[in-house]
Image (cartoon, rainbow, N blue to C red):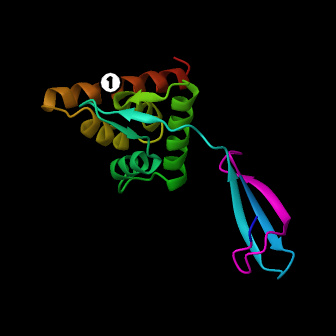
Amino acid sequence: MQCPHCHKNSSRVVDSRPTENGQVIRRRRECEKCGYRYTTFERIEQTPLLVVKNNGNREEFNREKVLKGIIRSAEKRPVSMDSMKTIVDNVESKIRAMGENEIPSQSIGEYVMKELVNVDEIAYIRFASVYRQFKDMTVFYNELKEVLDNDHQKSQKNNGE
């Protein structure tokens, strides 16, 4: 590894630790020539994942784009950034586990909604309203009713009814 300070190709690893759920290794290095310490990150190189949009266009999967959509839907809600990043991690893991190089954008949205409904129902409704493009109040009401019915079923299971 080349030192960013003196550009010598001789360094030693001082400390290593896993980050990002074990997907990345963070290494503290020290240049053997000048003693400068710096950090490097080692991660698995993954094949590009293409998202097939509704209009047929393809673009590379972008974690930041998914995260921004979740942030918008959770604005002014008690949802931590860690929770939102975990949703993105889970969605990306599910997509990559499929083993496909292309994924429809609808699938990504569905995965996000499945995760988001368990974190914050209001954020879920906000995300769903944009993602599903509610045309009128009836569609909105039906989605809201489904969330309320699921919530009612969960509370009955928890109360032992």
- Which of 150/29 is in front? 29
Say left or right for 158 vs 151: right
Quarter residue 60 falls in: top left
Q: Is residue 87 above or below residue 151?
A: below
Q: Is residue 86 above or below residue 105?
A: below
Q: Which residues, given as a range, are shown in magenta?
A: 3-24
Q: Is mark 1 on a helix, strand or loop?
A: helix
**Disc 1: which residue:** 146
Q: In this view, does 52 lie above or below 10?
A: above
Q: Residue 132: horizontal and vertical position, in percent?
A: 25, 32
Q: Residue furthest left?
A: 136
User: Looking at the image, which residue is at 14% across and 31% down?
Assistant: 135
User: Looking at the image, which residue is at 74% across and 73% down?
Assistant: 3
User: Looking at the image, which residue is at 55% across and 42% down?
Assistant: 89
Magenta-span inclusion, residue 12: yes
Q: Residue 158: horizontal and vertical position, in percent?
A: 55, 25
Q: Residue 56: horizontal and vertical position, in percent?
A: 27, 29
Magenta-span inclusion, residue 5: yes
Q: Residue 113: horizontal and vertical position, in percent?
A: 40, 33
